[in-house]
Image (spheres, rainbow, N blue to C red):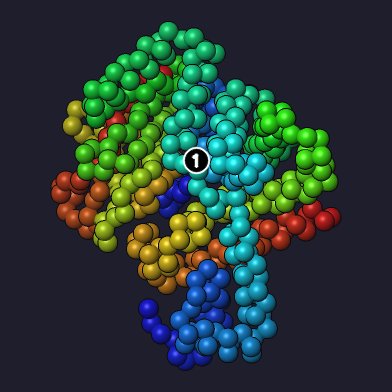
């Protein structure tokens, strides 16, 4: 999600407040920011593309219904939606297990489960970090890593010189690394 | 691209190291970069950090895109819930009208606005030139904001020397330029001039063209009250 130079993307917290008043367009904007990483959580945890889609639907339905319960003082919107995704994914997993009547021994070990969620939390932080970056540094990274464009193609796509793309990608990667290192250091404290 | 056969500066080495983190370098660039990294501890450490960050990006939760139709399914479910929850006759009527217009294939479709009667919004429908593009605009309630929130996706790549332009119209033939952007997907706030616009459109403009040269209209919408 990007905007032209000088424009400001609407903060998540302002969007969720609008969602709480029934604004579907604000929800659509949040979907375009978080739909993909929620789908990623579903793929990793549930290991089933159809269930991952169910997860996305569950999460955004809950967001639509419960947006008014979000409290910015307690943490970021990103952390909140991750928590919703986590609970929904665990529910979906339990429902799947009940449907399949899995024998007890095939249920996931709690410790493995914790490790999975710890890793997903770390992966979610990469998404959060990307979302906090300036769009002119973020967009070349997204185009390179998730759309598979070469630097030349990115330059054509964005209408900027190749040298600018090189510089932005280098600074963007460095910036992302800094944000992640700082968060890791804060967590260790 | 220019082939750097001479030794790289630290700035060049960092750019090439970032490029190497996601695509193979040409052999001569790789050799020049390796020579620089062998001699420069700072750049070597930087290159290792970049490689690590690139690995995180490659394995991130964003790697796989959900099916395109998922968004439609999610919002269909949400609208169904919304109707059950709110039971607003006006909203239902407007939604029904919108669906009839949609079936009729008309270019302009007024979406139901926010449910509590605030502000104005419009779906930006594509002209026949850019069928996959979609977008929307919203303006908060009168007296609370002079900002227009634009959300557009699926615009075609621009040719060199062109830009997208966002316009607000008074419905009487007068248009005001709100801003320009070059990305094919964008979400941004624009300051509105005085007066409430009736129409919004996105055009492709040639940079440097005379002011009276008409742009190519790609998206258009009429604002309706919520």
- In this rendering, the answer to whether A122 lies above or below A38 is below
Q: Going by the image, does A126 lie left or right of B100?
A: right
Q: Secondary structure at mark 1?
A: helix
Seen from the viewer's position, the closer of residues B71 and A79 is B71
- Percent from the top left, x then y, of residue B211? 18, 50
- In this rendering, the answer to whether A134 lies above or below B100 is below
Residue A147 visible from this viewpoint: yes
Seen from the viewer's position, the closer of residues B67 and A127 is B67
- Percent from the top left, x then y, of residue A132? 59, 50
Q: Residue placed at 58% from the left, 53% from the top?
A: A130
Residue A67 visible from this viewpoint: no
Residue on which disc 1 sits: A32
- Percent from the top left, x then y, of residue A6? 44, 50
| Total numbered labels placed on residues in the image | 1
> Residue B136: which quarter of the image?
top left
Q: Chain of mark 1?
A: A
Q: Residue placed at 47% from the left, 87% from the top?
A: B28
Q: Residue placed at 38% from the left, 17% from the top?
A: B95
Q: Residue placed at 58% from the left, 86% from the top?
A: B34
The C terminus of chain A lies in quadrant: bottom right
Seen from the viewer's position, the closer of residues A82 and A41 is A41
> Residue B189: which quarter of the image?
top left
Circle 1 packing at 10 Å, graded few (<14), some (14-19), many (20+), is: some
């Amino acid at each position: 999600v990007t905007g032209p130079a000088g424009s400001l993307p609407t903060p998540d917290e302002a969007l969720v407040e609008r969602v709480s008043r029934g604004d579907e367009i604000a929800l659509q904007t949040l979907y375009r920011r978080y739909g993909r990483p929620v789908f990623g959580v579903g793929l990793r945890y549930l290991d089933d593309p159809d269930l991952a889609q169910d997860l996305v639907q569950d999460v955004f339905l809950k967001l639509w219904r419960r947006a008014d319960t979000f409290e910015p003082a307690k943490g970021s919107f990103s952390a909140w939606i991750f928590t919703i995704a986590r609970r929904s994914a665990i529910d979906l997993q339990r429902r799947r297990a009940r449907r399949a009547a899995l024998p007890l021994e095939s249920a996931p070990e709690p410790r493995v489960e914790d490790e999975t969620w710890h890793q997903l939390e770390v992966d979610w932080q990469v998404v959060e970090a990307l979302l906090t970056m300036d769009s002119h540094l973020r967009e070349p990274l997204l185009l390179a890593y998730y759309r598979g464009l070469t630097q030349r193609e990115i330059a054509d796509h964005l209408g900027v010189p190749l040298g600018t793309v090189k510089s932005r990608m280098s600074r963007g990667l460095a910036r992302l690394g800094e944000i992640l290192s700082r968060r890791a250091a804060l967590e260790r404290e | 691209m220019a082939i750097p056969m001479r030794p790289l500066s630290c700035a060049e080495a960092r750019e090439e190291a970032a490029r190497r983190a996601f695509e193979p370098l040409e052999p001569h660039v790789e050799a020049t970069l390796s020579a620089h990294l062998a001699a420069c501890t700072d750049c070597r450490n930087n290159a290792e950090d970049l490689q690590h960050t690139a690995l995180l990006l490659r394995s991130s939760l964003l790697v796989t895109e959900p099916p395109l139709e998922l968004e439609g399914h999610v919002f269909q479910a949400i609208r169904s819930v919304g109707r059950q929850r709110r039971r607003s006759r006006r909203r239902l009527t407007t939604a029904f009208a919108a669906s009839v217009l949609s079936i009729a294939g008309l270019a302009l479709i007024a979406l139901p606005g926010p449910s509590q009667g605030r502000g104005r919004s419009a779906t930006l429908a594509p002209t026949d030139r850019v069928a996959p593009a979609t977008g929307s605009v919203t303006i908060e309630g009168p007296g609370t904001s002079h900002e227009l929130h634009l959300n557009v996706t699926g615009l075609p790549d621009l040719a060199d020397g062109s830009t997208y332009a966002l316009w607000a119209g008074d419905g009487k033939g007068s248009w005001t330029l709100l801003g320009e952007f070059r990305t094919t997907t964008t979400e941004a706030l624009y300051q509105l001039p005085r007066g409430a616009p009736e129409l919004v459109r996105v055009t492709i403009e040639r940079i440097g063209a005379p002011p009276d040269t008409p742009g190519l209209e790609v998206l258009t919408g009429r604002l309706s009250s919520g």
